[in-house]
Amino acid sequence: VTHQFERAGIPADADSAGLVRDELGRWLRDELRIGGELVADVTLATYEGMVNIAEHAYPYPSLAAPMSVLVRCDPRIALLAVTLSDSGTWRASNPAHQHLRGNGIPLMRALADRCTIDSSAAGTQVNLQWYRLLG
Amino acid sequence: VEQPPDRRPVAAGACSIARRQERGASVIAVAGVLDAVTAPQLGHAVAAATCPMPAVLIVDLSEVEFLSSAGMSALLATSDSVGRTGRFAVIADGPQTSRPLKLIGLTEVFDVYRSLDAALTALSS
């Protein structure tokens, strides 16, 4: 049985990212019955991905700017996969803010067992995967 | 001036910050969530605590349940400004705080202790 957590078309802003982070944490603990380090790693990496979308994909926050979050867990193959998507274009961060905002992507890469970011004209997809469900 | 620790419950997604003096150190205790929304609050608390610059500044994250890169950046900026003339340390323990600080390499940049007691003992020696 594959478990699924989905929030589609939510606003790409830091407030929504915080809300989804809290909901995701509860889902991981209550429905998947996982805890500790893995829940901390998954919620933080997912949050960083959402905040990056909010900050980089949509430079003009006043425009309607949705993002989607899909988390799937297949215990049979011990895989937990997070997919974040937007339809904006990721821009290089403002150099003035580089030292303040530069930790998000390295942190995602450090927290997830696998992290890929694919950008195209249609948008960006962030894939985060964990393979340590069985301990 | 000695201030009592702030023990009010922290709402979901919110952050509460209290400052006090302990054994000669200026201690900023953070509770709740330190993320992209709340990290500027830590910046303001640090600005207030570093004018004048204390000999020892400690940011205590013992009651922090979520620490994002924005919060880490605030810690890094604090370390940069305090480290020139004083000593700076962070209290963090657990998968939500000390683990990501270690993973991103910040435990190599500033000192991280598991308890305030350990930090005060190490910094006063």
Image (cartoon, coloured by chain):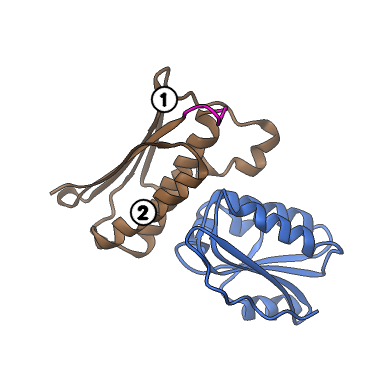
Query: Few, some or many C-alpha atoms within 10 Å of disc 2 (few <14, some 14-19, many ≥20)?
Result: some
Numbered range of the magenta stretch:
A59-64
Q: Amino acid at mark 2?
A: Glu
Q: Is residue B39 left or right of residue B53?
A: left
Q: Which chain is brown?
A: A
Tell me the subunit letter for badge 1: A
Q: Write down the residue under mark 1.
A: A87
Q: Position of residue B71 (x, y in %)?
A: 59, 54
Q: Quadrant of the N terminus of chain B?
A: bottom right
The C terminus of chain B sits in image quarter = bottom right
**Disc 1 versus disc 2: distance between alpha carbons?**
23 Å
- Does A127 sit above or below residue A63? below
Type of residue at label 1?
Ser
Quarter of the view holding residue A93: top right
Label 1 Cα crowd, 10 Å radius (few <14 / some 14-19 / many 20+): some
Q: Position of residue B89 (x, y in %)?
A: 68, 66
Residue A50: which quarter of the image?
Answer: top left
Q: Is residue A110 visible?
A: no
Query: Residue B64: in sight, yes or no?
Result: yes
Left/right of residue A12 with respect to residue B54 in the rendered view: left
| Residue at x 25% of width, y 63% of height | A33
Position of A56 with respect to B41 (left or right) is left
Q: Residue furthest top?
A: A121
Please report the residue visible at 27 percent of the width from the left and 62 percent of the height from the top: A30
Q: Residue at label 2?
A: A23
In the visual, does A14 lie left or right of A131?
right
From the rendered image, report the letter of the chain displayed in blue: B
x%, y% of residue B116? 63, 77
Name the spot of residue A83 as percent of width and height, x first.
33, 38
Task: Name the element at disc 1.
Answer: loop
